[in-house]
Image (spheres, helix red, strand yellow):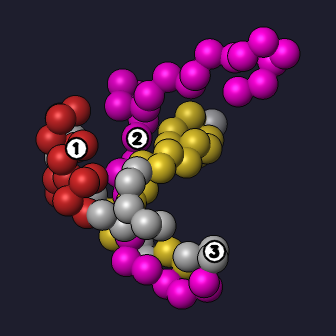
Amino acid sequence: MDGGLWLHRHVWKGRPMAHLVSVDRELLLAYGRAVGLDAGRLQFKPLKDPRTGVRRDAWHWDLVGGYLPPRPALAAGGKR
C-alpha cells in the first residue's frame, strides 16, 4: 500500500474479472486513460493496510472482458 498498482483476480457470477487497486488515485486514472476506461467508473473503497491495520484511502477499477489482462504463461513445473 505504498503506491503502485496491484491486480486482484477473482470470479464474479461465473465471470473472470479483476480489481486493479491502488492508494494512488492519479496513477489509476493515468492507467485508465491509457486503456480507455471511463474515469467515472473508478471506485473508492478504503482498505486496511495488512502491515499496520490502519484503513487507507484506496481506489479500484473493475476489469472484465477486453479490459482484463491475460494471465501470465505457466512456468516450467506448472507454477505461475
Q: Which residue is mark 1?
A: 32
Give the CA distance from mark 3 to mark 1. Answer: 26 Å
Q: Which residue is mark 2?
A: 63
Amino acid type, label 2 = Leu
Magenta-tinted stretch: 52-80
Q: Position of residue 77 (x, y in %)?
A: 84, 16
Q: Position of residue 62 (x, y in %)?
A: 40, 48
Q: Which residue is mark 3?
A: 50
Look at the numbered disc 2 and give the secondary structure of its residue.
Answer: strand
Location of residue 4 (image quadrant): bottom left
Residue at the spot x=47%, y=67% of the render?
Answer: 1
Amino acid type, label 3 = Pro
Above or below 79: residue 58: below
Q: Nearer the viewer, mark 2 or mark 3?
A: 3
Give the CA distance from mark 2 to mark 3. Answer: 24 Å
Residue at the spot x=44%, y=28% of the render?
Answer: 69
Q: Nearer the viewer, mark 1 or mark 2?
A: 1
Number of numbered tags placed on the structure image = 3
Amino acid type, label 1 = Gly
Dominant secondary structure, magenta: loop
Q: Is residue 13 visible?
A: no
Q: Answer whether residue 30 is magenta in the image.
A: no
As drawn, is 46 to the left or to the right of 33? right
